[in-house]
């Protein structure tokens, strides 16, 4: 299936859809019905390293636009607070000095870090939020060749997440490191959390039917314009213009991890952003994309990262331990 040139009168054109950098999903919208009171209100902004899209079904455009404003502010807040790329964020400050002293963080940051550590333990280190130094060395968005092996050897198999401690000091949450090599990267979980916050914001504004899509992380509330579940197309890793499969969701989330979203090719091998902590290099796998659905986008995000590259049975065992209600819906 290919993306049609125009999905509906109020939706995005095919060219705009393809411009959603890093987006693993395409929202498939039904054509508008004449004289239908409810309408689709959509907006897209750049945030968290991708383009985030909010789609709201509502009968009052101004109320919908105000709710979308609030949802986008939640996404921006998580970016300002939990991005390792911003020195002033909680994570930026933690990575700078937590190996010397405990750093006070926002309670939400502490919760997300603690949940990331839970996934690290349950996955036996396959999901490791302590790889910021490794991510900095690889820098797959700007590199054209792998870094020297000697620059990576000291980080391989270290289980660096075990050097991250979330604690309290004088009643406030703090984070500290037990060694200098550790640094936090919440790239496999924070965007899912941000989508959950955006959905909560829409609900608090009185919105009941909406979708928040931030690259490979999507959450759907209620029903689409036609009253049915939301239909979401999963992009082909080989050809982003092609839809590989379609799923229907309502009051649920999906997330995709894939080796085609960020990376480079060197001597016929693709080097991507999903690291193998045991080898201190991108995971080697024949799979290019894994999509997981779950009750929250945070869970779907962490789960998709944790199971990427694992065999089907191993992945299902991990999900059974960490998130019994989550399940894989696509492996490409």
Image: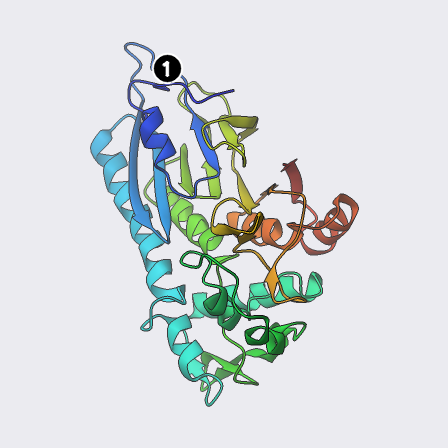
Outermost residue on the top side: it is 34
Q: Which colour scheme is used?
A: rainbow
Q: Give the image location of residue 41, x and y in percent.
A: 29, 30
* 31 is higher (above) or lower (below) than 324: above
Residue at position x 55%, y 66% from top? 129
Is 158 left, or right, of 145 in this rendering? Answer: right
Q: How many marks?
A: 1
The local secondary structure at tag 1 comes to loop
For label 1, the residue is 31
Residue 154 versus residue 250: which sits nearer the camera?
154
Is 265 left, or right, of 68 in this rendering? Answer: right
Outermost residue on the front side: it is 267
* 64 is higher (above) or lower (below) than 229: below
Outermost residue on the bottom side: it is 100
Q: Quadrant of the C terminus?
A: top right
Q: Give the image location of residue 290, x and y in percent.
A: 61, 42
Residue 269 versus residue 102: which sits nearer the camera?
269
Q: How crowded is mark 1: few (under 14 residues within 10 Å), some or many (20 or more)?
A: some
Residue at position x 47%, y 41% from top? 218
User: Is residue 67 visible to us here?
Assistant: yes
Q: Give the image location of residue 176, x and y in percent.
A: 50, 82
User: Is residue 111 visible to us here?
Assistant: no
Q: Could you say which quadrant of the image residue 144 lies in? A: bottom left
Is 170 left, or right, of 35 in this rendering? Answer: right
Q: Give the image location of residue 220, x and y in percent.
A: 47, 36
């Amino acid at each position: 299936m290919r993306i049609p040139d125009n999905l509906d009168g109020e939706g995005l054109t095919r060219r705009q859809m393809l411009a959603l950098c890093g987006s693993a999903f395409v929202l498939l919208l039904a054509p508008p019905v004449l004289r239908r009171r409810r309408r689709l209100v959509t907006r897209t902004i750049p945030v968290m390293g991708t383009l985030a899209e909010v789609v709201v079904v509502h009968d009052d455009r101004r109320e919908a636009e105000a709710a979308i404003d609030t949802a986008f502010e939640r996404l921006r807040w998580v970016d300002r607070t939990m991005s390792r790329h911003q020195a002033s964020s909680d994570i930026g400050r933690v990575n700078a000095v937590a190996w010397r002293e405990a750093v006070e963080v926002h309670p939400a940051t502490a919760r997300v870090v603690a949940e990331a550590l839970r996934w690290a333990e349950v996955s036996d280190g396959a999901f490791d939020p302590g790889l910021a130094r490794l991510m900095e060395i690889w820098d797959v968005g700007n590199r054209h060749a792998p870094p020297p092996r000697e620059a990576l050897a000291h980080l391989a198999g270290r289980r660096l997440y075990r050097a991250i401690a979330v604690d309290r000091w004088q009643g406030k949450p703090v984070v500290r490191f037990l060694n200098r090599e550790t640094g936090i990267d919440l790239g496999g979980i924070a965007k899912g959390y941000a989508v959950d916050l955006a959905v909560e914001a829409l609900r608090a504004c009185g919105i009941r039917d909406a979708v928040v899509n931030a690259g490979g992380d999507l959450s759907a509330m209620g029903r689409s314009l036609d009253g049915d579940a939301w239909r979401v197309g999963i992009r082909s890793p080989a050809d982003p213009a092609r839809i590989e499969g379609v799923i229907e969701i309502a009051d649920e989330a999906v997330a995709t991890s894939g080796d085609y979203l960020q990376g480079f090719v060197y001597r016929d091998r693709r080097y991507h952003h999903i690291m193998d902590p045991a080898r201190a290099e991108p995971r080697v796998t024949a799979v290019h994309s894994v999509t997981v659905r779950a009750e929250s986008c945070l869970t779907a995000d962490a789960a998709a990262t944790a199971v990427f590259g694992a065999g089907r049975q191993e992945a299902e065992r991990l999900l059974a331990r960490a998130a019994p209600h989550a399940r894989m819906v696509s492996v490409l």
